[in-house]
Amino acid sequence: MKRLGILTGGGDAPGLNAVIRAVSRVSQANGVELLGFKNGYNGLIHGDYMHLTMPHISGLLTKGGTILGTNNRDNPFNFPVQESGKIVYRDMSDKAIENLEKLNIGCLIVVGGDGSLAIARELSEKGAKTITVPKTIDNDILETDQTFGFDTAVNTATEALDKLHTTAESHHRVMVLELMGRYAGWITLYSGVAGGADVILIPEIPWKIEKVAEKILNRKRNGKYFSIVVVSEGVKTPEGDYVIRQTIKESGDPLRLGGISHVISKMIEDTTGIESRATVLGHLQRGGSPSPFDRVLATRYGVAAAKLALDGEHGKMVSLKNGVITSVPFEKIPSGCRVVPTDHQLICAAREMGISFGD
Protein backbone atom coordinates (compact mmCIF):
# COMPACT_ATOMS: atom_id res chain seq x y z
CA MET A 1 0.00 0.00 0.00
CA LYS A 2 1.44 3.34 -1.08
CA ARG A 3 -1.29 5.76 -0.04
CA LEU A 4 -3.86 6.33 2.67
CA GLY A 5 -6.55 9.00 2.74
CA ILE A 6 -8.09 10.86 5.66
CA LEU A 7 -10.94 13.32 6.09
CA THR A 8 -12.68 15.00 9.01
CA GLY A 9 -16.48 15.32 8.85
CA GLY A 10 -19.31 16.73 10.93
CA GLY A 11 -18.87 19.29 13.67
CA ASP A 12 -15.37 20.14 14.82
CA ALA A 13 -14.02 18.84 18.12
CA PRO A 14 -10.78 19.32 20.05
CA GLY A 15 -8.45 16.45 19.13
CA LEU A 16 -9.11 16.20 15.39
CA ASN A 17 -5.65 17.52 14.58
CA ALA A 18 -4.11 15.06 17.03
CA VAL A 19 -5.71 12.20 15.06
CA ILE A 20 -4.40 13.62 11.78
CA ARG A 21 -0.93 13.93 13.32
CA ALA A 22 -0.94 10.35 14.61
CA VAL A 23 -2.12 8.86 11.30
CA SER A 24 0.45 10.90 9.41
CA ARG A 25 3.34 9.87 11.66
CA VAL A 26 2.49 6.17 11.48
CA SER A 27 2.06 6.40 7.70
CA GLN A 28 5.39 8.15 7.21
CA ALA A 29 7.16 5.65 9.47
CA ASN A 30 5.91 2.90 7.17
CA GLY A 31 6.80 4.65 3.91
CA VAL A 32 3.15 5.35 3.04
CA GLU A 33 1.91 8.67 1.68
CA LEU A 34 -1.12 10.31 3.34
CA LEU A 35 -3.61 12.50 1.47
CA GLY A 36 -5.96 14.70 3.47
CA PHE A 37 -9.26 15.58 1.80
CA LYS A 38 -10.41 19.11 2.53
CA ASN A 39 -13.74 20.09 4.08
CA GLY A 40 -15.08 16.61 4.78
CA TYR A 41 -16.71 14.63 2.00
CA ASN A 42 -16.77 17.75 -0.18
CA GLY A 43 -13.05 17.35 -0.81
CA LEU A 44 -13.48 13.68 -1.67
CA ILE A 45 -16.13 14.47 -4.30
CA HIS A 46 -14.19 17.34 -5.86
CA GLY A 47 -10.76 15.75 -5.56
CA ASP A 48 -9.59 18.59 -3.32
CA TYR A 49 -6.79 17.30 -1.11
CA MET A 50 -3.39 18.04 0.37
CA HIS A 51 -0.31 15.88 0.86
CA LEU A 52 0.17 15.61 4.61
CA THR A 53 3.91 15.79 5.25
CA MET A 54 5.96 16.58 8.33
CA PRO A 55 5.72 20.38 8.00
CA HIS A 56 1.90 20.11 7.94
CA ILE A 57 1.65 18.12 11.15
CA SER A 58 4.28 20.00 13.15
CA GLY A 59 2.66 21.58 16.21
CA LEU A 60 -0.74 19.96 15.61
CA LEU A 61 -1.05 18.11 18.92
CA THR A 62 -2.12 21.17 20.91
CA LYS A 63 -4.16 22.86 18.18
CA GLY A 64 -7.96 22.77 18.23
CA GLY A 65 -10.16 22.42 15.16
CA THR A 66 -8.94 20.64 12.03
CA ILE A 67 -6.41 21.78 9.45
CA LEU A 68 -8.38 19.86 6.80
CA GLY A 69 -11.62 21.75 7.40
CA THR A 70 -14.97 20.06 7.93
CA ASN A 71 -18.69 20.35 7.31
CA ASN A 72 -21.83 18.45 8.24
CA ARG A 73 -23.85 18.95 5.07
CA ASP A 74 -22.09 17.33 2.10
CA ASN A 75 -23.30 13.73 1.95
CA PRO A 76 -21.98 11.91 -1.17
CA PHE A 77 -25.28 10.02 -1.39
CA ASN A 78 -27.25 13.28 -1.40
CA PHE A 79 -24.78 15.82 -2.70
CA PRO A 80 -25.64 19.39 -3.78
CA VAL A 81 -24.81 20.13 -7.44
CA GLN A 82 -25.71 23.09 -9.59
CA GLU A 83 -27.82 22.36 -12.63
CA SER A 84 -29.41 25.05 -14.82
CA GLY A 85 -28.73 27.66 -12.17
CA LYS A 86 -30.40 25.64 -9.42
CA ILE A 87 -29.08 23.48 -6.60
CA VAL A 88 -30.26 19.88 -6.86
CA TYR A 89 -29.19 16.84 -4.87
CA ARG A 90 -27.62 13.83 -6.56
CA ASP A 91 -26.04 10.53 -5.54
CA MET A 92 -22.32 11.21 -6.06
CA SER A 93 -21.03 8.18 -4.17
CA ASP A 94 -19.68 6.59 -7.36
CA LYS A 95 -17.64 9.74 -7.96
CA ALA A 96 -16.22 9.49 -4.43
CA ILE A 97 -15.16 5.88 -4.98
CA GLU A 98 -13.78 6.76 -8.41
CA ASN A 99 -11.57 9.46 -6.88
CA LEU A 100 -10.24 7.02 -4.28
CA GLU A 101 -9.33 4.57 -7.02
CA LYS A 102 -7.86 7.27 -9.27
CA LEU A 103 -5.62 8.47 -6.44
CA ASN A 104 -4.59 4.89 -5.63
CA ILE A 105 -5.76 5.19 -2.02
CA GLY A 106 -5.73 1.81 -0.31
CA CYS A 107 -7.95 2.88 2.59
CA LEU A 108 -9.84 6.02 3.62
CA ILE A 109 -9.83 6.96 7.31
CA VAL A 110 -12.95 8.94 8.23
CA VAL A 111 -12.91 10.90 11.49
CA GLY A 112 -16.40 12.01 12.46
CA GLY A 113 -19.63 11.65 14.37
CA ASP A 114 -22.55 9.35 13.72
CA GLY A 115 -23.49 10.99 10.41
CA SER A 116 -20.00 10.89 8.92
CA LEU A 117 -19.45 7.34 10.15
CA ALA A 118 -22.76 6.20 8.62
CA ILE A 119 -21.64 7.59 5.25
CA ALA A 120 -18.31 5.77 5.56
CA ARG A 121 -20.20 2.57 6.22
CA GLU A 122 -22.38 3.10 3.12
CA LEU A 123 -19.28 3.72 1.00
CA SER A 124 -17.81 0.51 2.42
CA GLU A 125 -20.91 -1.40 1.34
CA LYS A 126 -20.31 -0.10 -2.19
CA GLY A 127 -16.74 -1.39 -2.23
CA ALA A 128 -14.66 1.42 -0.75
CA LYS A 129 -12.19 0.45 1.95
CA THR A 130 -12.80 2.62 5.01
CA ILE A 131 -11.79 2.80 8.66
CA THR A 132 -13.59 5.17 11.02
CA VAL A 133 -12.58 7.10 14.13
CA PRO A 134 -15.42 8.18 16.47
CA LYS A 135 -15.44 11.88 17.20
CA THR A 136 -17.98 14.12 18.95
CA ILE A 137 -18.07 16.35 21.99
CA ASP A 138 -21.51 14.82 22.68
CA ASN A 139 -20.03 11.40 23.58
CA ASP A 140 -23.09 9.73 22.05
CA ILE A 141 -21.59 7.18 19.62
CA LEU A 142 -22.45 3.56 20.29
CA GLU A 143 -19.83 0.81 20.73
CA THR A 144 -17.18 3.05 22.24
CA ASP A 145 -16.85 4.13 25.87
CA GLN A 146 -15.72 7.66 25.06
CA THR A 147 -15.11 9.93 22.10
CA PHE A 148 -12.33 12.49 22.00
CA GLY A 149 -13.54 16.07 22.33
CA PHE A 150 -15.89 15.18 25.17
CA ASP A 151 -13.40 15.73 27.98
CA THR A 152 -12.40 19.16 26.65
CA ALA A 153 -16.05 20.19 26.29
CA VAL A 154 -16.72 19.15 29.91
CA ASN A 155 -13.72 21.22 31.05
CA THR A 156 -15.04 24.27 29.17
CA ALA A 157 -18.56 23.85 30.57
CA THR A 158 -17.24 23.37 34.11
CA GLU A 159 -15.19 26.56 33.85
CA ALA A 160 -18.33 28.41 32.72
CA LEU A 161 -20.23 27.07 35.74
CA ASP A 162 -17.44 28.23 38.03
CA LYS A 163 -17.80 31.75 36.65
CA LEU A 164 -21.60 31.71 36.88
CA HIS A 165 -21.40 30.80 40.55
CA THR A 166 -19.84 34.13 41.49
CA THR A 167 -22.39 36.31 39.70
CA ALA A 168 -25.30 34.14 40.87
CA GLU A 169 -24.18 34.40 44.48
CA SER A 170 -23.57 38.15 44.24
CA HIS A 171 -27.04 38.92 42.81
CA HIS A 172 -28.99 36.16 44.60
CA ARG A 173 -30.16 34.82 41.25
CA VAL A 174 -30.84 31.51 39.61
CA MET A 175 -28.43 30.99 36.72
CA VAL A 176 -29.44 28.52 34.02
CA LEU A 177 -26.64 27.27 31.77
CA GLU A 178 -27.54 25.50 28.51
CA LEU A 179 -25.05 23.02 27.10
CA MET A 180 -24.66 21.05 23.87
CA GLY A 181 -25.09 17.31 23.55
CA ARG A 182 -28.09 16.97 21.24
CA TYR A 183 -30.24 14.12 22.57
CA ALA A 184 -27.74 12.80 25.13
CA GLY A 185 -26.94 14.38 28.49
CA TRP A 186 -23.29 13.37 28.93
CA ILE A 187 -21.75 16.87 28.88
CA THR A 188 -24.46 18.26 31.16
CA LEU A 189 -24.22 15.41 33.66
CA TYR A 190 -20.43 15.44 33.99
CA SER A 191 -19.97 19.22 34.02
CA GLY A 192 -22.99 19.65 36.30
CA VAL A 193 -21.46 17.39 38.93
CA ALA A 194 -17.96 18.85 38.45
CA GLY A 195 -19.28 22.42 38.55
CA GLY A 196 -21.45 22.03 41.65
CA ALA A 197 -24.83 22.51 39.98
CA ASP A 198 -27.91 22.29 42.16
CA VAL A 199 -30.20 21.06 39.38
CA ILE A 200 -29.18 18.97 36.36
CA LEU A 201 -31.70 18.49 33.56
CA ILE A 202 -30.88 15.94 30.85
CA PRO A 203 -32.96 14.48 27.99
CA GLU A 204 -32.98 11.02 29.54
CA ILE A 205 -34.91 12.05 32.67
CA PRO A 206 -38.35 13.71 32.40
CA TRP A 207 -38.62 16.78 34.64
CA LYS A 208 -41.27 18.91 36.30
CA ILE A 209 -41.00 22.61 37.08
CA GLU A 210 -42.52 21.95 40.53
CA LYS A 211 -39.59 19.70 41.44
CA VAL A 212 -37.04 22.22 40.15
CA ALA A 213 -38.75 25.03 42.08
CA GLU A 214 -38.88 22.88 45.21
CA LYS A 215 -35.11 22.43 45.14
CA ILE A 216 -34.47 26.13 44.61
CA LEU A 217 -36.89 27.26 47.34
CA ASN A 218 -35.47 24.72 49.81
CA ARG A 219 -32.03 26.20 49.22
CA LYS A 220 -33.40 29.69 49.89
CA ARG A 221 -35.02 28.54 53.14
CA ASN A 222 -31.63 27.15 54.17
CA GLY A 223 -29.89 30.46 53.53
CA LYS A 224 -28.72 29.76 49.98
CA TYR A 225 -30.13 32.66 48.00
CA PHE A 226 -28.82 31.54 44.63
CA SER A 227 -28.97 28.35 42.60
CA ILE A 228 -27.22 26.91 39.55
CA VAL A 229 -29.24 24.95 36.98
CA VAL A 230 -27.52 23.21 34.07
CA VAL A 231 -29.62 21.92 31.17
CA SER A 232 -28.97 19.96 27.97
CA GLU A 233 -30.09 21.55 24.71
CA GLY A 234 -32.07 18.35 23.98
CA VAL A 235 -34.29 18.61 27.06
CA LYS A 236 -37.95 18.89 26.12
CA THR A 237 -40.45 21.43 27.40
CA PRO A 238 -43.13 20.25 29.87
CA GLU A 239 -45.38 19.91 26.81
CA GLY A 240 -42.97 17.39 25.32
CA ASP A 241 -41.50 19.59 22.57
CA TYR A 242 -37.92 20.34 21.62
CA VAL A 243 -36.89 23.99 21.46
CA ILE A 244 -35.55 24.39 17.93
CA ARG A 245 -33.36 27.32 16.97
CA GLN A 246 -33.13 26.54 13.26
CA THR A 247 -33.99 23.86 10.68
CA ILE A 248 -31.52 23.10 7.88
CA LYS A 249 -33.26 20.79 5.44
CA GLU A 250 -30.18 19.70 3.50
CA SER A 251 -28.33 18.56 6.62
CA GLY A 252 -28.24 14.95 7.79
CA ASP A 253 -29.31 16.28 11.20
CA PRO A 254 -31.66 19.12 10.19
CA LEU A 255 -32.76 20.27 13.64
CA ARG A 256 -30.56 22.81 15.40
CA LEU A 257 -31.57 22.72 19.04
CA GLY A 258 -31.24 25.74 21.27
CA GLY A 259 -33.13 27.98 23.65
CA ILE A 260 -34.55 25.62 26.27
CA SER A 261 -32.59 27.50 28.97
CA HIS A 262 -34.61 30.67 28.32
CA VAL A 263 -37.87 28.72 28.62
CA ILE A 264 -36.78 27.13 31.89
CA SER A 265 -35.38 30.39 33.29
CA LYS A 266 -38.72 32.15 32.82
CA MET A 267 -40.60 29.21 34.34
CA ILE A 268 -38.33 29.28 37.39
CA GLU A 269 -38.78 33.02 37.86
CA ASP A 270 -42.55 32.78 37.45
CA THR A 271 -42.81 29.83 39.86
CA THR A 272 -40.36 30.89 42.59
CA GLY A 273 -40.33 34.67 42.30
CA ILE A 274 -36.53 34.56 42.24
CA GLU A 275 -34.77 36.50 39.50
CA SER A 276 -33.35 34.09 36.90
CA ARG A 277 -30.97 34.44 33.98
CA ALA A 278 -30.15 32.07 31.10
CA THR A 279 -26.81 31.54 29.36
CA VAL A 280 -26.30 29.44 26.22
CA LEU A 281 -22.65 28.36 26.10
CA GLY A 282 -22.91 27.25 22.47
CA HIS A 283 -19.89 26.72 20.24
CA LEU A 284 -17.38 27.68 22.91
CA GLN A 285 -17.67 24.01 23.88
CA ARG A 286 -16.17 22.96 20.54
CA GLY A 287 -13.23 25.33 20.61
CA GLY A 288 -9.82 25.61 22.13
CA SER A 289 -6.87 23.35 22.70
CA PRO A 290 -7.72 19.72 23.52
CA SER A 291 -7.28 18.57 27.11
CA PRO A 292 -4.42 16.18 27.89
CA PHE A 293 -6.92 13.30 28.05
CA ASP A 294 -8.29 14.13 24.59
CA ARG A 295 -4.80 14.52 23.13
CA VAL A 296 -3.90 11.07 24.36
CA LEU A 297 -7.18 9.44 23.31
CA ALA A 298 -7.10 11.05 19.85
CA THR A 299 -3.49 9.93 19.40
CA ARG A 300 -4.36 6.36 20.41
CA TYR A 301 -7.29 6.35 18.01
CA GLY A 302 -5.17 7.72 15.16
CA VAL A 303 -2.41 5.17 15.66
CA ALA A 304 -4.91 2.31 15.81
CA ALA A 305 -6.72 3.48 12.66
CA ALA A 306 -3.48 3.80 10.71
CA LYS A 307 -2.26 0.38 11.81
CA LEU A 308 -5.54 -1.26 10.82
CA ALA A 309 -5.39 0.35 7.39
CA LEU A 310 -1.73 -0.59 6.86
CA ASP A 311 -2.52 -4.18 7.86
CA GLY A 312 -5.15 -4.34 5.14
CA GLU A 313 -8.11 -4.17 7.52
CA HIS A 314 -11.21 -2.14 6.64
CA GLY A 315 -14.91 -1.90 7.44
CA LYS A 316 -14.17 -1.22 11.11
CA MET A 317 -14.42 1.57 13.69
CA VAL A 318 -11.67 2.00 16.27
CA SER A 319 -13.11 1.94 19.75
CA LEU A 320 -12.26 2.44 23.42
CA LYS A 321 -13.48 -0.46 25.56
CA ASN A 322 -12.61 -0.70 29.27
CA GLY A 323 -9.52 1.43 28.74
CA VAL A 324 -8.26 -0.61 25.77
CA ILE A 325 -8.24 0.53 22.14
CA THR A 326 -9.88 -2.08 19.93
CA SER A 327 -12.03 -2.12 16.79
CA VAL A 328 -15.62 -3.01 15.94
CA PRO A 329 -16.85 -4.22 12.51
CA PHE A 330 -19.39 -1.86 10.96
CA GLU A 331 -22.08 -4.54 10.90
CA LYS A 332 -21.89 -4.92 14.68
CA ILE A 333 -22.53 -1.22 15.35
CA PRO A 334 -26.26 -0.64 15.91
CA SER A 335 -27.99 2.50 14.71
CA GLY A 336 -29.05 5.06 17.25
CA CYS A 337 -27.62 7.32 19.91
CA ARG A 338 -25.67 6.39 23.03
CA VAL A 339 -27.67 8.02 25.81
CA VAL A 340 -27.01 8.23 29.55
CA PRO A 341 -28.52 5.25 31.44
CA THR A 342 -30.86 6.53 34.12
CA ASP A 343 -29.12 4.28 36.64
CA HIS A 344 -25.65 5.52 35.68
CA GLN A 345 -23.30 5.59 38.66
CA LEU A 346 -22.73 9.33 38.36
CA ILE A 347 -26.48 10.01 38.42
CA CYS A 348 -26.78 7.87 41.54
CA ALA A 349 -23.84 9.68 43.16
CA ALA A 350 -25.32 13.07 42.25
CA ARG A 351 -28.65 12.15 43.84
CA GLU A 352 -26.83 11.11 47.02
CA MET A 353 -25.20 14.55 47.01
CA GLY A 354 -28.62 16.19 46.93
CA ILE A 355 -28.54 17.29 43.29
CA SER A 356 -32.01 17.41 41.73
CA PHE A 357 -32.79 16.01 38.28
CA GLY A 358 -36.22 17.60 38.29
CA ASP A 359 -38.06 14.29 38.69
Image (spheres, grey):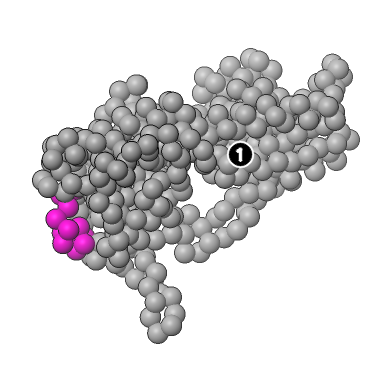
Queried whether the magenta region covers residue 265, the answer comes back as: no
Q: Secondary structure at mark 1?
A: strand
- Residue 353 left/right relative to 313: right
Q: Is residue 33 visible?
A: yes
105 inside magenta stretch = yes
Along the line of sight, which residue is nearer the eye, 42 or 173?
Answer: 42
Residue at horizontal 45%, vertical 40%? 64
Left/right placement of residue 90 relative to residue 169 reads left
Q: Which residue has dot 1 on it?
A: 179
Image quadrant for the C terminus?
top right
**CA neighbours of label 1 inside 10 A, class few (<14), some (14 to 19), many (20+):** many
Residue 196 quadrant: top right
Residue 7, image x, y percentages: 32, 50
Which residue is nearer to you in this view: 353 or 53? 53
Q: Which residues are magenta?
A: 97-107
Left or right: residue 213 compared with residue 129: right
Q: Amino acid at mark 1?
A: Leu
In the image, taking residue 94 as reference, residue 60 lies left or right, namely right
The residue nearer to you, when weighing 215 against 239, is 215
- Residue 321, position as x, y percentages in the image: 33, 26
Q: Position of residue 50 (x, y in %)?
A: 28, 54
> Would you identify the image quadrant in which residue 127 lies?
bottom left
Could you tell me which residue is drawn at 17 percent across and 58 percent down? 103
Rendered residue at 19%/39% (across/down): 28
- Placement of 54 over or under 340, stated as above or below: below
Point out residue 237 in the picture as x, y percentages from the top left corner. 68, 45
The answer to whether residue 168 is above or below residue 110 is above
Q: Residue furthest bottom?
A: 84
Q: Residue at x 44, y 55 (%)?
A: 72
Camera-side residue: 238 or 175? 175
* Residue 313 visible within the image: no
Extreme residue in the front direction: 55
